[in-house]
Amino acid sequence: NNDASTEETDSGKYKIAVSNAFMGNDWRQLMIRCLEVAAEKEPYSDKIDLTIVNSENSPEAQSSAIDALVEEGYDAILVDASSATALQTSVNRALQQGITVVSFDSVIDMDGVYTVQTDLVGMAECWAAYLCEKLGDGAKVAVDTGMPGSTNGNTVYEAIMAIMEEHNMDVVAEFASEYTDGVCQEQLASVLAANPDLEGILSQAYVESCYAALTQAGMDLIPVTAYDTNLGMITAVNNDMDAIIGNNCPGLGVIAMDVAMRVLDGEEVEQDLFVEPGIFV
């Protein structure tokens, strides 16, 4: 890093910005709220001035937002990316200005960028193995692709499909929940209408979304996978559902902020940090 990266504001604090590409689900809103709360607490409140910039979910909009932050002379930019590749040009401009870049959650893999992410491959493999064990080889399942174009969605999908193939599972339908309750329910309603003999759902949304879709279709509560919510865990327990829930912690943004602060402080920090997911059944 050059001198520009460690220059502090008039208040003596580091200027750190968050570039977030999407606010359309609960996870992103929780992630932003975690950052806002943490930034007001020690050790961050005395050392960091935090700015959060939300873009529409397009690489063009986020690239423009990052370019604007570079012009404004931020010390560090935390990026939850709309695209793993399309943002590389604007991120490279930030790096050339000596700005510390930490990419988290949906990450950009390029030289000079610090990354913070959940071990989604490990989580997805646990999901898929659980369902294969519950259902037996060759069962009929539906697979959620997540958010179209999302690095995380593709990572989870590919890990799931590798295990589906190993166990000769019959993937009768794919759908895109966009990690959103309403979209997941709507997409699943179509899948269930076309496949009343479905035996399992590999969802990248929530237990409560799957529960609502199954009950509205008048179907048995078949085994499901899902991301974490307290409501999902309660829904699973109260309705005796077979469910495996993976934890993609909304606090990833705070971990990224901590990495940026330590880099600016001159500490040696690991370039790539994998957070082990919690798994609940």
Image: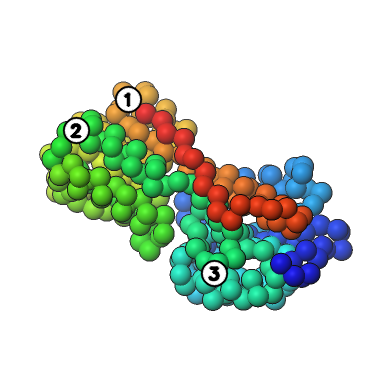
Residue 21 % position (x, y): 52, 62
Is the N terminus in the top left, top right, bottom left or bottom right quadrant?
bottom right
Amino acid tagged 3? Gln
Question: Where, by quadrant of the figure, is residue 51 drawn?
Answer: bottom right
Mark 2 or 1, which is nearer the eye?
Answer: 2
Residue 204 % position (x, y): 36, 46
Secondary element at tag 3: helix
Residue name at image x 68 percent, y 68 percent: 99
Q: Please rate how many residues cluster around mark 2, counting C-alpha atoms within 10 Å: few if below 14, some from 14 to 19, many from 20.
A: some
Residue name at image x 58 percent, y 74 percent: 92
* Pointer 2 residue: 135
Amino acid tagged 2? Leu
* Pointer 1 residue: 239
Residue name at image x 61 percent, y 52 percent: 270
Pointer 3 or 1: first along the chain: 3
Q: Circles 2 and 1: CB distance less than 8 Å?
A: no
Instruction: Please tell me which residue lies in front, 203 or 56.
Output: 203
**Left or right of 64 in this view: 74:** right
Instruction: Give residue 62's mark.
Output: 3
Secondary element at tag 1: loop
Q: CA distance from mark 3 to mark 2?
A: 42 Å
Q: Please rate how many residues cluster around mark 1, counting C-alpha atoms within 10 Å: few if below 14, some from 14 to 19, many from 20.
A: few
